Image (cartoon, rainbow, N blue to C red):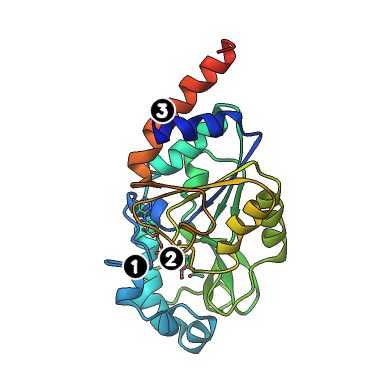
Amino acid sequence: MTRIDRLARRIARAGRIAVLTGAGVSVESGIPPFRGRGGLWERFDPMEYATIGAFLNDPGKVWRVMLGELNGLIMRARPGAGHIGLAKLEALGKSVTVITQNVDGLHQQAGSSAVIELHGTFARLRCLNCGAVSATAATDLGILPPRCPCGGILRPACIFFGEEILPSDLLRSRQASAGCDLMLVIGTSANVHPAALMPLVAKQAGAAVVEINPEPTALTGRISDELLCGKAGEVMPPLLAAVQATLTDFGRGA
Ligand code: OAD
């Protein structure tokens, strides 16, 4: 039996599946990761562009140098085979909760219905002055930083370094992790907490933890039971086909 077939059986048998995703799942959609070669942190110093202090100090600079470009990439991106595969698992009747560190909304676009955006979203902007929330797609980003009708500067509704994750998102993520039989960890280097703690929570609660990533991560050989080495877009389609075949076999009583 291949490793894909073995994982497909685990998925088919699992009652509840939690999935932790990171930037890697969106790489094939044209959004670069943060770390490693070609990563955003190679071009932008996170201390200068990704902390809340840096943003509040000079929102125009952070918008012009990094956020404007990131928004363009997100607007053009379409779900890839990784996102689509997870949505299909749900369509096959599996209970799937996606905990994502990504702010691109691609899991929802693909059709996943239970998505926790641990690091917030780029789809909405919030006024630093009056707190009004608006859709990014409906906002004029021609002049940066964008402004609210009240004159205040708009910030994306994502979490900058130095900001707290929403307690309700953290609670739901911990619940999904502690309550799953299987956790898939796709496309994250697992360097940023508390997201990277979710596989540990799952493991401690007795779940199997399986990574899909072209490279080993901070979890490999320590927390995860297995690493399926490959891109999400390469691993997910054959995995889905194998899950579908396994579920059909189970249905026949095989
Ligand atoms: P990283 O950039 O740290 O890691 C991306 C991971 O994706 C790496 O392990 C890659 O090997 C893997 N990868 C690359 N291409 C892939 C592909 N096609 N399929 C599957 N995996 C692939 O991104 P994250 O772990 O998401 O936070 O980073 C976590 C957080 O750090 C981000 O949410 C962001 C960042 O700083 C904030 O900004 C708050």
Q: Give the secondary structure at mark 1.
A: helix
Q: Give the secondary structure at mark 3.
A: loop
Q: Which residue is mark 2?
A: 140
Residue 223: percent from left, percent from top: 54, 57
The residue type indicated by label 2 comes to Asp
Q: Residue at x 67, y 49 (%)?
A: 176
In the picture, which quadrant includes the C terminus?
Answer: top right
Q: Earlier in the sequence, mark 2 or mark 1?
A: 1
The residue type indicated by label 3 comes to Met
Q: Quadrant of ligand 1?
A: bottom left
Residue 80: percent from left, percent from top: 37, 43
Badge 2 residue CB within 8 Å of ligand 1: no
Frontmost of labels 3 and 1 is 3
Badge 3 residue CB within 8 Å of ligand 1: no
Q: CA distance from mark 3 to mark 2?
A: 54 Å
Which residue is nearer to you in this view: 154 or 175? 175
Q: Residue at x 52, y 33 (%)?
A: 89
Asked if residue 13 shows in the view, the reply is yes
Which label was assigned to residue 69? 1
Which label was assigned to residue 1? 3
Q: Quadrant of residue 143?
A: bottom left
Q: How many numbered tags mark residues here?
A: 3
